[in-house]
Image (cartoon, helix red, strand yellow):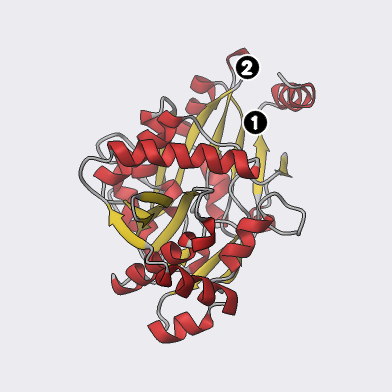
Amino acid sequence: MSFILATAENLAQGDDFLIEKSRDAQATSVFLQSSSWLTVQENYGRKVYSWFYQDQKGGEIKGVVAGIVMPLPFGKSYFFSPRGPILEKKLLAEFLQTSSWLETIKKENIIFWRFEPLADFKAFNLSACRQVADHEPSQTAVLDLSLNADLLFASLKQKTRYNINLAKRHEIKIDFVSQGDLTQLKKIFWQLTTATGARHHLKHFPKNYYDNLIDILAKKGMLEVAIAKHQQDILAINLNILFGHSVIYLLGASAEQKKNLMAPYLLQWQAISRAQKAGFRWYDFYGIATGAQHKLAGVTKFKQGFAGQTVNYPGTFEKTISPFWYFIYKTGKQIRF
């Protein structure tokens, strides 16, 4: 039984294990531990690492620990495992003593490990570890697509059903694109993203991050771009991830114009219907907020109108590796590097 550091040649071998995990509503976003997501990060200029746990040499993979080396001042870095590790609690202590992990810490000057377990964190019983502000959302809404289509629609909140039908009456057209030249769509998505960010006071990545994400995931067959149009105007675009048994509504952006036509409601419903017809089990809205004063309260209300079940994650944690430099890092955050 051992942990194996993945190489570029065998990185995708852990994906079958993750796909099987995605059968569980608690694990719909394990694509963040996949080889494709690591490729997105690597092409963006970040170093990535992944370890597989095998019960015997060359045996079945039964755990994945993947992450991204994130740079810090003074030549230091931290290791970030989004929605990971995907590992039994009894194996985590063993991983932290794995020689290739210890060598990576030294090589990359890693001062702490940020991770987001799917299971109750207390069960891991790690020392020198603390909970910090969420990175990935600690709550999401997940829709069970095994329901009959009519029952699924009937389960939506009344206002959501009304807005879907309103968009239909206004002849909103929905298209789905997953291949071909996406250059123009990337340009429009960026325009809508910046407009949405300004409207709701939300931060966003640079344009090349989204371009890179779209290009790579589309090539790997993991991305579907959903587009809502009215006449010649594109009113909303969603980026949906297709992974294992789940479709994940990763990103969305919409125009201020013609918002009374309720295009995002029909766009979301058509994506849900499409996922159901394709045989997916879950539709993950990828994050909801708590509290009426939260900046994402409006987005959360929109998502909850589709009546998905609430799934809770333990949150984001940081395991200290270098106490001195971690203290410097936390102090620096308070005074802003």
Which is nearer the eye, 282 or 209? Answer: 209
- Horizontal and vertical percent position of residue 238: 42, 52
Which is nearer the eye, 56 or 46? Answer: 46
Q: Secondary structure at mark 1?
A: loop
Mark 1: which amino acid? Ile
- Horizontal and vertical percent position of residue 36: 34, 43
Kindly identify the residue that appears in the image at 33 percent across and 68 percent down.
274
| Residue 246 vertical position relative to residue 126 in the rendered view, above or below | below
- Horizontal and vertical percent position of residue 293: 77, 54
Q: How many marks?
A: 2
Q: Is residue 183 left or right of residue 90?
A: left
- Disc 2 to disc 1, C-alpha distance: 16 Å
Q: Residues within 10 Å of mark 2 (few under 14, many from 20)?
A: few
Dot 2 or dot 1, earlier in sequence: 2
Q: Is residue 96 left or right of residue 22?
A: right
Q: Do we see residue 196 in this rendering?
A: yes
| Residue 326 vertical position relative to residue 134 in the rendered view, above or below | above
Mark 2 vs mark 1: give the one in front: 2
Kindly identify the residue that appears in the image at 38 percent across and 30 percent down.
42
Q: Secondary structure at mark 2?
A: helix
- Horizontal and vertical percent position of residue 151: 45, 86
Which residue is tagged 1? 321
- Say which mark, if any, is on residue 73: 2
Looking at the rendering, which quadrant does residue 248 occupy? bottom left
Kindly identify the residue that appears in the image at 20 percent across and 44 percent down.
180
Kindly identify the residue that appears in the image at 59 percent across and 60 percent down.
119
**Furthest-left residue in view?**
180
Mark 2: which amino acid? Pro
